[in-house]
Amino acid sequence: MDLLFWIIGFSLLGGLISVIIASSFLLLSENHRSIAVPHLVSFAIGALLGASFLGLLPHAIEHQHHVDSHQIGLTLLLGLMLFFVLEKMVLWRHCHSHHGEDHIPELDRPDHHGGHSHKHEAAGPLILVGDTIHNFVDGILITAAFMTDIHLGIVTALAIAAHEIPQELGDFVILLHSGFSRKKALYFNILSSLGTLAGALLAYFTLSDMQQYLPYILVIAASSFIYVAVADLIPGLHSRVQPRETLQQIVLIALGVVFIFITHSTLH
């Protein structure tokens, strides 16, 4: 029962609390958000990669007496391909253009025809559907990590939260641009965030009798983090090429990795 409380608490951190924190950034001016979001994204990249290579994959490899190391590598490759296909189908994440403030439409800015474009109006519901699926899978990954090791669960949930904050902020802005009021955007984002808890609870009651599959789920989680960091987040940073900005990106990515390393080492 203690494990279930851990899972519920950190699932809420990865979902609901991330939404609330992200919504607070809407109180900032657009100029301040344009500064904050790339920094949050850089830190999230480090956290995701740190959780993958310092936490999830090592724990999966530790179960080698259950699985072959080649199967772990194959699962990682298949996972990367899976998330590529899902993103192509607009099921995993909305497209790369929604990552980073440079690619987020301005609040309440009409198109050149004098109103919100049909594309932006359709984007809102599509984002909510994709985000709910994304959050549901995150919940499964959090539970799988906690069922392997509580410390790994904490690190995994923190990495997810680090990624969710700038991501949810991007969702907020796009929903507002699609015609949602601030209150309505917050309401639907909160509902979507509960997908994390739903996925976590479902996994808790189904994975308890499927311990032999946990290493593979950890590898899938790692492939998810790696794909999001490398394919979705890093390309957005390349639009900022000034030496000072590049140095800031490197430092913040490193801080994300160090944060995961220290958290994991301290908990152990």
Image: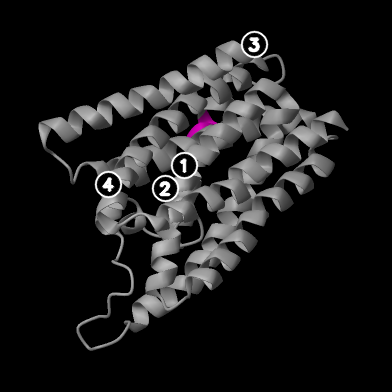
Image quadrant in which you'd find residue 172: bottom left
Mark in front: 2 vs 4: 2
Circles 2, 1 touching at the beta carbon (< 8 Å): yes
Task: Answer with mark 4 or mark 1, whichever residue precedes in sequence.
Answer: 1
**Tag 1: amino acid:** His
Task: Answer with mark 2 or mark 4, whichever residue precedes in sequence.
Answer: 2
Range of residues picked out in magenta: 74-78
Q: Cα distance, mark 3 to mark 4?
A: 34 Å
Residue picked out by circle 4: 236
**Tag 3: amino acid:** His
Image coordinates of residue 16 in percent, x first then y, are 62, 51
Q: Residues within 10 Å of mark 2 (few under 14, many from 20)?
A: many
Image coordinates of residue 77 in percent, x first then y, are 47, 35
Residue picked out by circle 2: 166
Residue picked out by circle 3: 268
Instruction: Judge whether residue 25 can be spotted in this image.
Output: yes
